[in-house]
Image (tube, grey):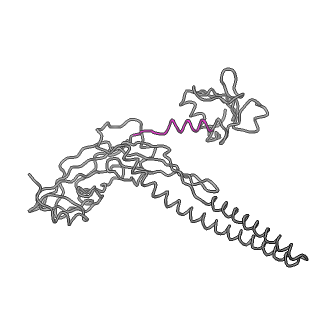
Amino acid sequence: MVVESTVSPLESFLREYLDKTGGVWDEIEPQVYDVALPAGTELPTGRCSDSGVVRLTFDPEALPEHPSAQLASFGTPLVDRLLSDALQRGRAGQFCVVGLNLQPHDLLTRLRRSIHVAPATIQIERVRALHFPQVVFWFQAAFVSDQKEQIILPVAVDLHQGREVRHAEELLKPTRLAEQPSPPLPPARASSLTCGYRLARAQILRSVTALANNRGRELTERCDIQIARLERYYADLRAELTEQKRRARNADEATARHAERIAALEREQQVRAAELRKKSILHVDLRLLQLLRIEQPKLLVQTVLTAADHAAGQLEVVWDPLLEAVEAVSCPLCGKPSYDFTLSRFGQVGCEACKPTLASAKPPRR
């Protein structure tokens, strides 16, 4: 019996993939398997029995004992097909965050410590527990020049607030994720997945642009060094030709031959320099690999803002039980997140940047 800890990651992937997709596997000896691939999978030619069973081995040394077996390793056609199919099947998923405390102690005091509304006092009008959708996008950026480099860039977006989530690692902890919500809650209002994707892509583009600029500078510097080395090399060749011309007995013939060789060297140098510059051009490809929608319970708190000689105002606040913190509130006027607000005499609420707007505002129509 094989000890589970000795199973390679690729073997574990094969087992789990076949279990999930309707295939069958049988380990006939360590690192050697007979597998029946799921329906629709292209079978390797000449490597399967009449019944469609394929013998795979993860150990190259086992091939002499199993000549009909196919070596399973990264880069082989069959493994690449299985990995690609697994990626296609898992492009989108959905989980719910469970096990959070939706009855925080002294919520009003916590709100007043986090949110400041001059000169008003915050009072809680209503609290509702809702599921707030957040989506984690994984993008793949490929940087291609004379070599190829691929990196995975994740970004999480809160579809309710319409902004990036900074605590994606906390959100993705497996111990908090479940396929079914507990307890079931109504959904909070949220932007569409398309809007979330646009926001995530815009954020990733900024990151990729910075990475591309750094790599572009490195390529340019390396290209300049190579071209400088190339120029010195051809300068030495031209110096040798000039010396040969000086030593030649037939000056006229040497002069004509020298001119032809110099012209040939110039053309060759230009071609090689152009090749170096072409190889140093950086191409960037960005694509979405996967996304995961996570429904997280939060508290939507409707607050009333009261102050002497002021009409009452309202502010919608979100309490995040995962972080046990109040989220920055979107300004009702400009939409920017903030913790500091001002209540106008007419009950309008705005952030510090919107104070001039509040000062010049007219009473709302009744």
Which residue corresponds to the image point at 25% horizontal and 60% vertical from the top-left?
A: 113
Residue 256 locus on image (x, y percent): 82, 71
Q: What percent of the width, then of the height, locates residue 10? A: 62, 40
Check residue 336 for magenta coloring.
no
User: Residue 187, image x and y in percent?
Assistant: 30, 40
Does 198 sit above or below residue 269? Answer: above
Q: In which quarter of the image is residue 131?
A: top left
Residue 8 location, quadrant: top right
Q: Which residue lies furthest to the right in this view?
A: 249
Residue numbers of the magenta segment: 80-95
State the image coordinates of residue 122 (x, y, percent, origin top left). Answer: 18, 57
| Nearer to me, 302 or 217 | 217
Name, please, the residue furthest toward the front. 252
Left or right: 64, with 141 as reference point: right
Most distant residue in the top direction: 51
Rendered-image quadrant of the N terminus: top right
The chief SS type of the magenta part is helix
